[in-house]
Image: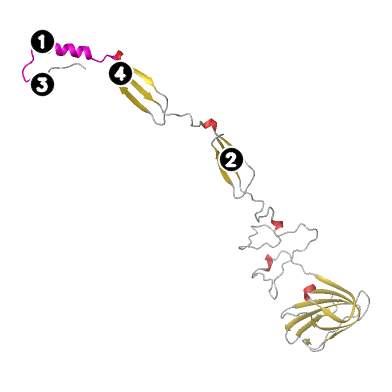
Amino acid sequence: MATIVTRSGKGSALTFVEADANFTNLNTDKLELTDLSVTTATPAETSALTYNNTTGVLTFTPVYIGDLAALDDLSVSTAAPSGAGSLTYNNSTGTFTFSPADTSLLPFIETIDEDTTPQLGGNLDVNNNSITTTVTDGDITITANGAGEVVLGPITDVGKISAFSEDIETLVGVSGTLNIDAADGPIKYVVPSGAMTINGLASPIEGQTTTLLIDNATNSSNHGITLGVGLLTPAGDGVTVTDSGYDLVTITCVDSTNGLYIVTSINDFQ
C-alpha cells in the first residue's frame, strides 16, 4: 500500500515534491475494474459472499440443494386398510403412502334390514309416505310390551280414517263351552254344530269387546247360547238366536277382576 504524507502527520505544510509523490503513489495503488474478478465456490450448508483484498477476487458460495426434492419427485400411493389408518413418507423414494382405517371389524350395517333389533332415537316422521310391506298379503303388526297398549292419538274427525279392518276368526262346527280369546281377533264368525256356553273371555281386559256373528243359517239350525255367571244382559233374559238365521252377539268386559260382562245381541241380522 502506498505511503501518503499528510500535513497533520508532518506537522507543517507539504512541499511540492511531497504533494507530487502523494499523487504518484495514489495513481500507482488505485483499484481498476479490471483488477476485480468473481468466482463461485463449492456449495455449502449456508451461502456466503467473500472478498480477497490481495487478489481482488469476490467469491460466492451457494447453498447446497442436492438433497432437496422437486415437486415432481413426490408421489402418493394407497395401501391396504390397516388398524386406525396412517400416512407415511419414504424419504428415499419421495412417496407418501396412505393406509385407510380397517373398518371390517366395526359394528356397522350396510342396509337397515341387517339390524334385527332397531330402535328409534326420536319420533318417526313418515313425511307424507306410508309404512308398507313387500310380503304378498302380509300383515303389519304393532305389538305393545307386556300390559302396554297400542295407543292412537286423538282423532277429532272420523273422515281422517280412510281405511280400517279387523281380523275375523272363523269357528266352524263348534259346540259346548266356547274359549273366546279377543287376541285372536275381536270379531268371531261362528257356525255352531250344537248348543254353546259362554263363560267370558280368555285373559280379559276391562273395556275389551268381542263380537260374535252366529250363523245358524248355513246348517239350518237353531243352536242356542247359554251365558255363564257374570255375563249380564240389559233385560236379564239371556240371549236368543234366530232359527236358521244370523245373530250378532257383543260381549264387553266391565270388570276383569270379578268376571263381569255386558252382553247385547241383534237378532235376525240380515
Secondary structure type for disc 4: loop
Q: Which quarter of the rendered picture does the C terminus lie within?
A: bottom right
Label 3 environment density (alpha carbons within 10 Å; few <14, some 14–19, many ≥20)? few
Q: Which residue is mark 4?
A: 56
Above or below: residue 126 compared with residue 233: above
- First in sequence, mark 1 or 4: give its number: 1
Three-letter code for the amino acid on which mark 3 is drawn: Gly
Q: CA distance from mark 3 to mark 2?
A: 77 Å
Q: Quadrant of residue 36?
A: top left
Q: Which residue is mark 3?
A: 9
Three-letter code for the amino acid on which mark 1 is drawn: Val
9 relative position to 249: left or right: left
250 relative position to 42: left or right: right
Secondary structure type for disc 2: strand
Q: CA distance from mark 1 to mark 3?
A: 16 Å
Three-letter code for the amino acid on which mark 2 is drawn: Thr
Q: Which residue is mark 1?
A: 17
Point 19% across, 14% down: residue: 26
Q: Quadrant of residue 171?
A: bottom right
- First in sequence, mark 3 or 2: give its number: 3
Query: Where residue 97 is drawn, which disc sits there?
Result: 2
190 relative position to 230: left or right: right
In this rendered view, identify the residue nearer to me: 130 or 257. Answer: 257
Secondary structure type for disc 3: helix
